[in-house]
Amino acid sequence: MRGQRVLVSGMGSELGSLVASLLESQEWVGALEGIDIDPPRRRLRKAVFHRIEPHDRARVVEVVTRFNPHVVIHVAVWEPDARVNTVTARQLTHDAATSVLGAAAECPALEHVVVRSAAEIYGRARRSLTRPDETAPLDPTSEFGRMAAVIEQTANDVGNRAGVTVGALRLAPVLGPHVPSPLGRLLRMPIVPFSVLADPPFAVLRDLDAADAFVAAARVGLAEPLNIAAPGAITAWQAILRGRRLPVPNVGPEWAITRRISHLFGAPVPDHVVETLHRGRLIDGGRAREILGVSPTVTTPEVIDRLYAWPSVIHVIQPNTQHRGAA
Amino acid sequence: MARGTTQIIPLETGEARYAPLANVLRVETNPVSLVGPSPTVDEWGRDARLISVLAPIAHARWDVAVGGEHHLRRGAALVVVNTRRFALTPVSTALALSEALGRPVRFAGRPDIVPFGPFLRRVGGLLADPDEIAGALRAGEIVVLGARASRNPRHAGAIDSALIAAAVREHVPVHVAATLGSMISRQARVEVAAALRPRRKRRGPLAEVELAEQAQRGLQDLLDELGGTRTAVPGLGWLGEG
C-alpha cells in the first residue's frame, strides 16, 4: 500500500487543496500531484501542482500519463453559481471529467478512482424519498444533479474499460469558511428568502469532513457510491433565525423574482438551491462509518452556526511603522 | 446546554434570582418557542417542538390509553393498525405511542403536496413508499402503517404487502395494533400485540404476501378480543361505535 502515487484533479479549489493537505500527511501516499485551473488555496509542502485549463486535453493527458497514478481523486466539479455561472460550470465540469478521467484510463498503474458527486443526484421530484440511501433511483431534477450523474457515469465507464474500482462520494451541500457555496452565500445575506408553506429540512456538510471522506475513500478503495452528510437537519427558517437574518416568506411563484433580486445583490440562487429551500435535501449517510471508518463529526446545526460565525471582513492590523523605523 | 440536564447557577450571580421567572416564561411561551432559532427537526424532518406544542390540542381531542407498548421498547418495528376513513388513525396512534414510549414514532402515508405534506412530515409522516419505510426501519425507527380503511371500525382492512416487504427486507419485527375510538368520544385505545411470527419461512415474495395476510388476521382477532367502544347512555350505546 505504501508509495502510492495519487493525483488530485481540482487541487486549486478549497475542497481539493484540503484533500491534498490531508493526503500529504498520509503514510501510504508516496507522490502527490494535482491539476486545476487555479493554484491551490493553501500551502502544500509535498504536492506538485500543474496549472492546466480543463479543455487543454493534450496537456492533461501528457501530465497524467507521465505521473501514472495509482489513485485518482476527481474533485474538479464546478457547482453552478459557486465560482462561475451555470453554463460555464457545466462546460468546465464536463471538460475536466473528460480530460482527467479519460487520461487516467490510459495509465497502466491505475487501480482506483474516487469522484466527487452530490446529493442533488437523487432529485426532489414529487414522491421522491425523503432520505434516499445509495440504492435509491437517480432522478436528478436540477442542473447540478444532472452534472453529478454525468460525472458518475463517466467514471463508471472509465472503471469498466480500465478494469479499476470506482467510488463516488455524494456530498450534501458543502459549507466552509472559504468554500464558494451559493447556499452559504444566500444564507449569509441580511435578508433571506424561505419557503413558508414547506420550510423543509436539509442537511449540509463541513468542508473538512468532506475532505476526510475523500482521503478515507482513496485509502480503503471505495468501490461504490456513498452518501456523506453531517448528522442532524435544519430548516431554512431555523437557519435564518440562528443567523439573526431577516426572513422573507415565499409561497412559490415569486421565487423567480426573488432569485433575480438576490442575484443583483451578489448571491445568485441556482435551481438546486431553490430546490433545497423548497423541497428539502436529506440523505441517508449511515453507511459512511461502516465503509470508510470515518463519518462527519460536526452536526448540521453546528455547520450552520459556523457559517454565521465567519467574519465578513478580516481586519489586518498594520505593523507599527514608527517602531520599525526606530529599529 | 443539553436538553434534560440541570443548569447550575451560582447563587452569588444575579442570574439566579431570575431563573424561576425564566422557567415560568419558558413553559408559558412554549407555543411561541416554535419561532425560536434552536433546530428541533430530526434527520427525517420530525419536529419534536412542534409536537410538544400540538400535544395539548391532541389531548383535548383524544384521550388515548396505550397497552402492550412494552413489545416496542427497543429497536425498529413496523406497527400495522386498523384505520377508518378520515380518522387519521396512523397519526393519532403514532403520537400516542411516541408519548407512551418516550421516543419518536413515525407513520407512513403522508401526501407529498404543500402544505399538508410538509406539515405531516413535521409530525413524523413518511411517504407510503416501501423504500422510504425500509430506510426508516434500517435507521432503527418505529413506523406505524395503516391497513386499508374500512367503514366498520371493528373490521381490519387489507394490508399492502409491498409495504410489509420493507420490514421483511430489513428483518424487522411486524406488530399489529388494534385501535378503538369513536368520532364523538374522546376515549380511545391502542393495544399493541407481540411481534408476528411467520408460519413458514419463505425466500421469495410469498414472505410478505403471507405476512400481510397474517397481520390482517391478527389485527381482526385483536379487534374481536377488545370488543367495541360503547357510550354509557342507555339505548344509545351504539353511538360509541362512531
Image: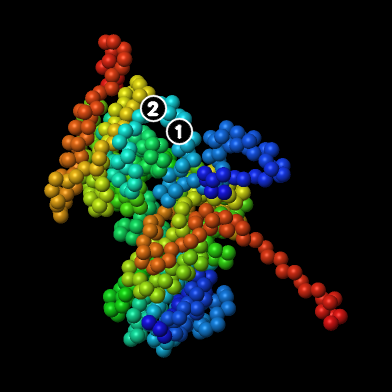
> Looking at the picture, how far across and down is residue B24, in whole percent?
60, 33
Q: Residue at x 57, y 44 (%)?
A: B6
Q: Residue at x 32, y 71 (%)?
A: A223
**Residue B160 visible to the viewer:** no
**Badge 1 amino acid:** Ala
Q: Along the horizontal axis of the image, is A68 left or right of B30?
A: left
Q: Along the horizontal axis of the image, is A115 left or right of A157?
A: right
Residue at the extreme top? B234
Q: Residue at x 72, y 44 (%)?
A: B12
Marks 2/1: CA–CA distance: 10 Å
Task: Please give the residue where the numbered disc 2 appears in the rendered image.
Answer: B62
> Looking at the picture, how far across and down is residue B69, in whole percent?
33, 38
**Badge 2 amino acid:** Trp
Q: Is residue A17 above or below residue B159?
A: below
> Looking at the picture, how far across and down is residue A85, in whole percent?
51, 64
Task: Please give the residue where the numbered disc 1 appears in the rendered image.
Answer: B55
Between A197 and A135, the one lying in front of the other is A135
Among numbered discs 2 and 1, the one appearing first in the sequence: 1
Q: Residue at x 49, y 50 (%)?
A: A234
Residue at the extreme bottom? A66
Q: Is residue A300 above or below residue B178?
A: below
Q: Residues within 10 Å of mark 2 (few under 14, many from 20)?
A: some
SS of the residue at dot 2?
Answer: loop
Q: Quadrant of the C terminus of chain B?
A: top left
Q: Is residue B71 above or below residue B140?
A: above
> Looking at the picture, how far across and down is residue A107, in whole percent?
35, 85
User: Which quadrant of the figure has residue A185?
Assistant: bottom right
**Residue B203 visible to the viewer:** yes
Query: What chain does mark 1 sit on?
Result: B
SS of the residue at dot 1?
Answer: helix
Query: What chain does mark 2 sit on?
Result: B
Q: Residues within 10 Å of mark 1 (few under 14, many from 20)?
A: some
